[in-house]
Structures are given as structure tokens and as C-alpha cells.
Image (spheres, rainbow, N blue to C red):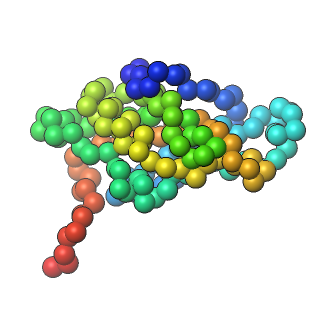
């Protein structure tokens, strides 16, 4: 496991809630911990997972590293991070490597630039830990930027 920041993410033991964000033909799945039944007063409230702002995802989508593209390397990186109650990512680690270091680094760096709508419990922002799979595929067309219709 590659570590990009010094702290190990705080892992919450719970069931999983999922959210999806479609981006440039690639699906990003985030998993966040939900309260465990019987875990106290907070377990009775409604919990909503954090969501990345789509504009940030599109603006800071991981760039395919030139050397990986030239070598025909593909893979999926699972990045684990903590989203603070302010919506900032921290404690970013590679939970599952793509086996290509440059893809792992590109995914972690891109996610570190995203801003999130924080998880909420009873309508109040709370910290949450999520896992985001980021897929690098040479067959997926990159989003067209500034392309004029023909």
C-alpha cells in the first residue's frame, strides 16, 4: 500500500452506503461508513454519505500519465480518504493499487484537489471515510475540452 500522507485514515466499523458520480464515461463509486445499529444516540439519526462536487471532479480528473499511456498500462486504483465535516479530503492512501505506480500517484493527487459535500448525520456535517475506485482505461475517450461541433 502506497502512503501519500503521513496519517493512517480513521476507519469506521459499520455498514456501507454508496454514492455514484458519472464522469467522462467512468463511474466513481464511493463507500462511506453508516452508523452501526445500537451504537448510541447518533445511530438513530439519518446519515447521508459525502459527495464530490461534479465540477471539481471534471476539473481535476486524474490525467493519464504519459509513460503509462505509452506503455499501454491500464488499471483501477482504489483510493481511501477521510472527508472532513468542512468537505476537505485528507489522509489519502491507496487502498488497492493498480500495480502501476504512476496511475496510483495520479489518482491520489487528483482526489486531493476535489472538494466534497460532507457526510451528514441528522442534517449536521460529520467526518467520514470513503473508498473511491478510479479506473484508467485506454479505450475510454477523454472528455473533449473546447472541441467545436463538426
Residue drawn where x is 38% and y is 22% of the image = 2
Give the total number of marks visible in the rendering: 0
Residue depicted at x 60% and y 46%: 86
- Write the residue at 68% across / 42% down: 126
Q: Give 8 or 68, whichever is nearer the viewer.
A: 8
Q: Residue at x 57, y 47 (%)?
A: 87
Q: Quadrant of residue 150?
A: bottom left
Residue 22 makes an appearance in the image: no
Q: Position of residue 108 (x, y in %)?
A: 38, 35
**Quadrant, the N terminus:** top left
Instruction: Indicate whether 81 appears above or below 26.
Output: above
Q: Position of residue 10 (x, y in %)?
A: 61, 26
Q: Residue furthest left?
A: 70
Residue 36, x across and y down, in percent: 77, 34
Q: Is residue 13 found left or right of 89 in the rendered image?
A: right
Q: Is residue 53 left or right of residue 113?
A: right
121 lies above or below 73: below
Q: Nearer the viewer, residue 42 or 77?
A: 42
| Residue 134 appears left or right of 52 | left
Decide: is 16 above or below 149: above
**Residue 59 falls in which quadrant of the image?**
bottom left
Amino acid at each position: 500500500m502506497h502512503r501519500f500522507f503521513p496519517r493512517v485514515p480513521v476507519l469506521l466499523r459499520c455498514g456501507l452506503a454508496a454514492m455514484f458520480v458519472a464522469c467522462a464515461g467512468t463511474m466513481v463509486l464511493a463507500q462511506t461508513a453508516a452508523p452501526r445499529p445500537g451504537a448510541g444516540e447518533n445511530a438513530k439519526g439519518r446519515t447521508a454519505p459525502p459527495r464530490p462536487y461534479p465540477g471539481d471532479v471534471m476539473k481535476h480528473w486524474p490525467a493519464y500519465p504519459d509513460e503509462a499511456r505509452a506503455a499501454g498500462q491500464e488499471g483501477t486504483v482504489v483510493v481511501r480518504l477521510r472527508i472532513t465535516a468542512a468537505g476537505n479530503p485528507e489522509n489519502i492512501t491507496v487502498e488497492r493499487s493498480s500495480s502501476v505506480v504512476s496511475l496510483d500517484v495520479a489518482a491520489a493527487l487528483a482526489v486531493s484537489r476535489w472538494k466534497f459535500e460532507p457526510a451528514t448525520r441528522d442534517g449536521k456535517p460529520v467526518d467520514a471515510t470513503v473508498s473511491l475506485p478510479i479506473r484508467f482505461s485506454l479505450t475510454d475517450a477523454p472528455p473533449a475540452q473546447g472541441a467545436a461541433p463538426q
